[in-house]
Amino acid sequence: MVARVIPVEAFDLVIFGGTGDLARRKILPGLFRRFQAGQMPPEARIIGAARAEHSDDEFRALVADAVAEFMPKAAQDKEALAAFLQRLSYVAIDAKGTQGWSQLKETMRSDVVQAYYFSVAPALFGDIALRLTDNGIAGPDARIVVEKPFGRDLASARALNETLAKHFTESQIYRIDHYLGKETVQNLMAVRFANILFEPLWKSEYIDHVQITVAETVGVNGRGAYYDKSGTMRDMVQNHLMQLLCLIAMEPPYHFDPDAVRDEKLKVIRALDPVQPQDIVRGQYLGGGGEGSYLEDSENPHSRTESYIALKVAISNWRWKGTPFYLRTGKRLRARASEIAVTFREPPHSIFDDAEGWRENVLVIRLQPDEGMHLMVMIKEPGPGGMRLTQVPLDMSFATALGPEAAEVPDAYERLIMDVIRGNQTLFMRGDEVEAAWAWTDPIIEGWEARGDRPQPYDAGTSGPEDALMLMHRDGRRWREIK
Ligand code: BG6
C-alpha cells in the first residue's frame, strides 16, 4: 500500500540551532524525506540559523553531509537532494544579541506559513521568543516549535510556559514529544477508537494489567553530562512513557481534535496516584564487553542518577481502579524493543479440563522495531488428542499486512514537522499537560533524593535489575521477555 501524500501549504521554516545535533540527525533529513515524497510545495523554504558564520552554500554542504550520514538510502537520490538544497539558506544570528535579526526579518515572507523551530537549549527560548516578536519578525499566526526537555521540574516548566506565553498564544506553541509522532503510537488511537472490538473490554473488569516497555541498547556515552543531570525518570518517563500511558488509558475524545484529545490525556495524568517507594526500582548499568559503565559514560564516578527505571502506577478513576500499569525503560538492555502489552483477565469460568494449557489473552502493540500488533488468543491444539488448549498470535505486522512500503515507517519528526505546517496540534503537548506530568513526577524524584536511594547496578545486555522482576513477581505477574 503506497502512502497518500497531500502537499502542505507554502512555508518559511526557521531552524534555530540549525547546525546542531538534532537538526542534523532528525529535522533536516526528515524534511528532505518529505520533500522527496512530494509533500513540499515549490514555495517552501528552510532557513538555518545559528551563531557561527556560514554562507548558504556552506550550510547546504553541511545538510548534504547530514542526510548522507543519517539517511544514506534517501541520499542516493542525488537529483532530489540537489533540488532540496536549493530551498535552504542560512542566517548567522545571536540569540542574546542584535546580530542577524534584521536579516532574518528581511528573509521572512508574510504571506506564507511561518514556523520557528527552537532546536536550542531551553535557556535560550525566552531570548529568541522576545527577539522574534520585538523585532516584528513573527507574524500573528507564526508557530513556534520547542523540544524537550521542557523543564526539569514543575517550577522550571511553569517558568518556561510563562516566558513563552508573554510572546505567543498557546495555539502557536508546538511542544514536541517525538513519541507521539511514531506511527504505531498514532495507531493506538486508531485501534482503540476506530474499532468496536476492544473498547467494551477496555476497563479494569476485563484488563488485569498493562505493561509498557521502552528498552534501549544504547548507553549515555557522548551525552553523559546532560543525562546525568536528568536521569531516566526525567528523560523518558515524564514525557514518552507518560504519553503512551495516556493514550492507553484515556476516555474516547469526542473528536480527533487537538484540545479534545489533550483534555482526555490531561485527565489521566491528574488521576495518577502518587507512587510508593516500594513500587519504584531504579538501576544503573555496569560496564563489560568493551563498553563503559554508566559511571564511566557519565564521567561522574559518584553518580546516583538512574539509567533504568521500573514503576508500578495506579490510575484512580472508575475505568482503571484495580488495574496496575507497569512501566519500565532503560539503557544498555538486551534489545531495542518498545511495546505495550495489555493483558486481559481469565474467563469467569472454564469449561475445559486443560487448565495448564490456558494463557491470558494479550494485546501487544509493538512500537519498534517491527511495528505492528498481535493478539494472543486461545485455540484448540490441532490433532486427535482431545480438547487441549494452546495459544497462538493473531498477527498483524504492518510489513506483512500493508506491504513492504509500510515497513518504511516515516520518522516521527517527519510527521510532526508537517503537522506544524498544517497547524495541527493534536500530537503536541499542551502547557497544562506538561505541568501536570511534572506535578506527578516531582514528588517521586524528591522522595528518592530525600531517602538517599542509590540505583541498583545491572549487567549490560540483560533486562535490568533483579528487583524489577520482583516488582511483578510479588503481584503474581511477570514481565514479558525483552526481545
Ligand atoms: C529521547 C531521549 O527523547 O528519546 C533519549 O532523550 C532516548 O535518551 C530517545 O534514547 C529514544 O527515542 P527513540 O525514538 O529512539 O525510541
Image: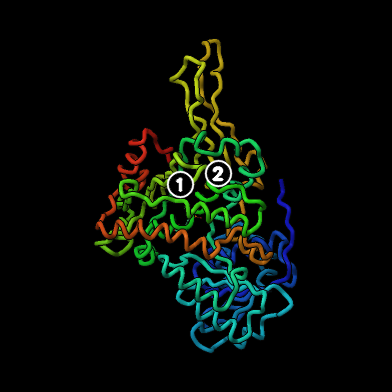
CA–CA distance in space, label 2 to label 1: 33 Å
Check disc 1 and report the residue beneath it.
316
10 relative to 460, above or below: below
Q: Residue at x 55, y 13 (%)?
A: 383
Give neighbour class at mark 2: few <14, some 14-19, many 20+ (Cα, 10 Å): some
Name the residue located 63 percent from the left edge and 79 percent from the top edge.
138
Q: Can you say whether 366 is above or below 264 in the image?
A: above
Residue type at the position of mark 1: Ser
Q: Quadrant of the N terminus?
A: top right
Check disc 2 and give the amino acid type.
Asp
Question: Mark 2 highlights which residue?
Answer: 370
Mark 1: few, some, or many residues within 10 Å (few <14, many ≥20)? some
The image quadrant that residue 195 belongs to is top right
On the image, the x and y values in percent for residue 317 come to: 49, 46
**Image height check: is 207 above or below 384?**
below
Q: Is residue 60 something one can see in this rendering? A: no
